[in-house]
Image (spheres, helix red, strand yellow):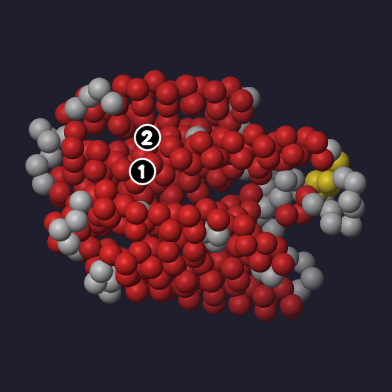
Amino acid sequence: MTRDRISFLFINIGHFFDHLILLVFATVAALVLVREWGLSYSELIPYAIPGLIAFGVGALPAGWIADKWSREAMMVVFFIGLGVAAAATAFAETPLQIGVGLFLIGLFAAIYHPVGLAMVVEGRRRTSVPLAVNGVFWNMGVACAARLIDVAGWRAAFAVPGTVCITVGCAYAIFVYTGARHRLRTTVSERHDETVPDAKLTISRRSLFRVFAIVFFTTAVGGLIFQSTTFALPKVLEERLHELAGTSTEVGWYAFLVFAVAALAQLVVGYLVDRYPLRTVFACIAALQVVLFALMQQLAGAAALLVAVCFMLAVFGQIPINDVLIGRTTTSACFDSSSRSRWRQRRCQ
């Protein structure tokens, strides 16, 4: 296996842990802490808000530091920092303590998307399928978060993935260190067979801002839908599947089933985006979300489960679209800081 493929595997594993650890609390709060701590679900959710805010806002400094310092080094910080934060949260005894732990988890989890996704698309001609594969690891992390609580208990649900994440981070640090030594010994780096030769293409500032405006709007709305649905799904299923799921274990299994099946949508959308206009695929996915979301509000039992699967297919299917749009427009190599009047795109898709 080449170094590029090993690096891609590490990045995918990082996406898995990013969303696994970030969403453990959603299942913990819905199925366990409401009983153990005697608080309602609505009383527990506010303790997760600072972490979710940190997850969003923290991406800005994380991306800036990665550009100024090193993407690989930032990924090492991501793995080890996220693992330590998760393991520490397992020792929480009060809602305030678990809120602090969730804030640290969100802060370190914020590193992944501006850094990891940039590493996925770097040097590739076709980015849709790699991003879709990366997204499947994301979705499986979400799915496993729904099941981990019943397998190990709520404290272990934080401690076990946190410990494994630290271990993976140490392995990745060794991998990066050996790669740095290899680059010092040779002037010819090993490249993936899909590496794109250098090419210059000027993108107007107006076009670039227009793309970012579209991405900002769609990501904001899509992110709201994704975060709200994935965070609330275990609780929704507990309320709507009372005829099918009488215990928290059964609810966890149904949530795992929904997320796992929905993960396949990213592969399908990645395939379609490489072969059909991006706007057409995006419009179809958005329309499906509207229809299925309206249906979901009226259903219960097996019908609700079926529509939940279809709805999450549409929600997860949107994930690669924004990533592909950004990847096709610009990478870190696309911005020529020496020119104030134009943006240059080199080695871009």
Q: Residues within 10 Å of mark 1 (few under 14, many from 20)?
A: many
Q: Residues within 10 Å of mark 2 (few under 14, many from 20)?
A: many
- The answer, for residue 144, to whether it is visible in the render is no
Give the image quarter of residue 183.
Answer: bottom right
| Closer-to-camera residue (28/176) | 28
Callout 1: SS: helix
* Rendered-image quadrant of the N terminus: bottom right
| Closer-to-camera residue (164/51) | 51
Q: Is residue 84 left or right of residue 27?
A: right
Which residue is labeled 2 in the image?
312
- Where does the image place residue 215, in percent across and percent down from the top left? 62, 38
Which residue is labeled 1 in the image?
230
Q: Determine whether label 2 and label 1 are within 8 Å by CB.
A: yes
| Residue mark closest to the camera, 2 vs 1 | 1
Ranked by sequence position, the earlier of labels 2 and 1 is 1
Q: Residue at x 72, y 67 (%)?
A: 68
